[in-house]
Amino acid sequence: MPSLWTKTLIYLGLAEDEDEEYDEPGTEEETSSTRRSASVRRIADSPSSAGKGAVVRVMPPTPAAKFHLVHPYSFNDAQEVGDKFREGFSVLMNLQAADSDLSRRLVDFASGLAYGLNGSLQPVADKVFLITPNGVQVSAEERRRFLEERGFYNQA
């Protein structure tokens, strides 16, 4: 009797069933063709065919972007950037006062953060970057207004 591990491997198609070796030679082709078709499942094409147990994630309309401005002076400030980004804020990271090594590390961190959470990273001025979460759209007018309020006129 196969163990639970062996049964799991057989179910996933990663191992062969030991009983198949002892089948009659005349039925081998029929068995292999039915086994292949039985292990393939069709993915639902529409939500109605997915069944009652399907989970549908409803995305609310895009709210007005919430901004958070960060002036990092050490790499420890990256946690604030990550926390605010995960909370759904668009993070404006001003690296104008940071040295070049710190700036490079923070941009690398921000790009990994944005990529990992399906967001985006955009340069908006000299050494100023906007990190937006997935599903948040910041219009050019809103971004321009926010930057002008904070004194960033040199847009890239």
Image (spheres, rainbow, N blue to C red):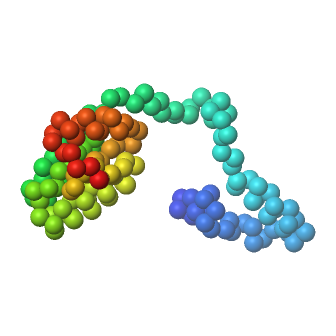
Is residue 119 at all visible to an observer of this figure?
Answer: yes
On the image, the x and y values in percent for residue 33 come to 81, 61
Please name the residue shown 15% across and 64% down the image. 102
- Please state if 122 lies on the left or on the right of 40 as rendered: left
Q: Which residue lies furthest to the right in this view?
A: 26
**Up-down relation of residue 60 to residue 6 (above or below):** above
Please name the residue shown 34% across and 43% down the image. 133
Please name the residue shown 26% across and 49% down the image. 155
**Up-down relation of residue 27 to residue 114 (above or below):** below
On the image, the x and y values in percent for residue 60 come to 42, 28
Please identify the quarter of the rendering in which residue 132 is found: top left
- Please state if 20 lies on the left or on the right of 144 as rendered: right
On the image, the x and y values in percent for residue 31 come to 81, 62
Please identify the quarter of the rendering in which residue 91 is found: top left
Please name the residue shown 15% across and 42% down the image. 151
> Exactly how many numbered labels are in the figure?
0
